[in-house]
Image: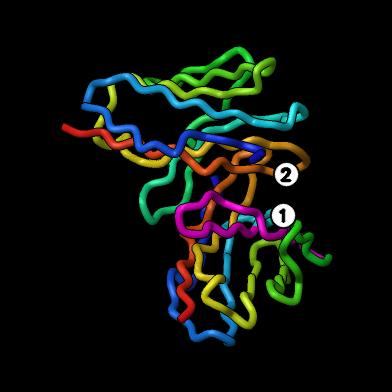
Amino acid sequence: SAVISQKPSRDICQRGTSLTIQCQVDSQVTMMFWYRQQPGQSLTLIATANQGSEATYESGFVIDKFPISRPNLTFSTLTVSNMSPEDSSIYLCSVADPNEKLFFGSGTQLSVL
Amino acid sequence: RKEVEQDPGPFNVPEGATVAFNCTYSNSASQSFFWYRQDCRKEPKLLMSVYSSGNEDGRFTAQLNRASQYISLLIRDSKLSDSATYLCVVRIGFQKLVFGTGTRLLVSP
């Protein structure tokens, strides 16, 4: 199983600012996934981060709002830009093993005032 | 209609009870199925994959009914430590997983 370090674990931010979340994996992986879990909701995939190419965004998510970097096979960042209270959520990065099993970072709990 | 639907619960059961959760999915082309467990304020963790023939892992049994498009999870001899939210997860495309909203289980002494 992969070990994923995600930080920050939580943050409280002012509206209009941006937050960058970092995710470090202990092994090289082709794809990394960024999810959002809003209060009382399930996980929703934001985008898939591929090394060496632009991230692939799901319907309802755009690069200007959630820019993603993937500089190498063990690291990725997700930025939540121009935040509003509606962005308050838990953000999770994850990787999949060859058997399709997902392993998650511990999550970033974001509160926007 | 949601792609993956679960009864949100909560299911309140005493220790030692048997409890079952169901999950339905709408995409008949769904390819793989999983149950994840999520503790309060923690990240989800894989509990078990679900195979067409059904599979068991200790006190946990998972079943898949492709014709009716539902998945079930049975927990026998419930423990206090089983209290968590159980997420039904379906793969509908390459690396595309869809999560249900989860069923909350509370096991009491």
Foreground: A106 or A44? A44
Q: Quadrant of the N terminus of chain A?
A: top right
Element marked by disc 2: loop
Tell me the crowding category of disc 2: few under 14, some 14 to 19, or many 20 or more residues within 10 angstroms, Cα based: some
Given the current orientation, which residue lies at the most extreme left position? B109
Q: Tags 1 and 2 in contact by the CB under 8 Å rule?
A: yes
Task: Please tell me whether mark 1 or mark 2 is closer to you in this view.
Answer: 2
Residue displayed at 48% across by 82% down: A13
Above or below — where is B33 with respect to B39? above
- Say whether residue B10 is left or right of residue B92: left
From the viewer's perspective, tell me whether residue A18 is left or right of residue B46.
right
Query: Is residue A45 inside the magenta stretch?
Result: yes
Give coordinates of residue B60: x percent, y percent. Answer: 41, 22
Disc 2 marks a residue whose amino acid type is: Gln
Observer-nearest residue: B62 or A13? A13
Q: Which residues are magenta?
A: A34-52
- Judging by the rendered image, the residue that carries numbered circle 1 is A31
Q: Residue at x 69, y 15 (%)?
A: B67
| Disc 1 residue type (three-letter) | Met
Identify the chain of the residue marked 1, using the numbered disc in the image. Answer: A
The circle on residue A56 is none
Give x and y (percent) for residue A42: 53, 49
Residue at left offset 29%, top offset 37%: B106
Mark 1 → mark 2, Cα distance in angstroms: 9 Å
Q: Is residue B59 above or below residue A66?
A: above
Residue at the image point whose x is 57% and y is 58% from the top? A26
Query: Which residue is identified by label 2?
Result: B95
Dot 1 lies on which element? Answer: strand
Q: 10 Å neighbourhood of mark 1: few (<14), some, or many (≥20)?
A: some
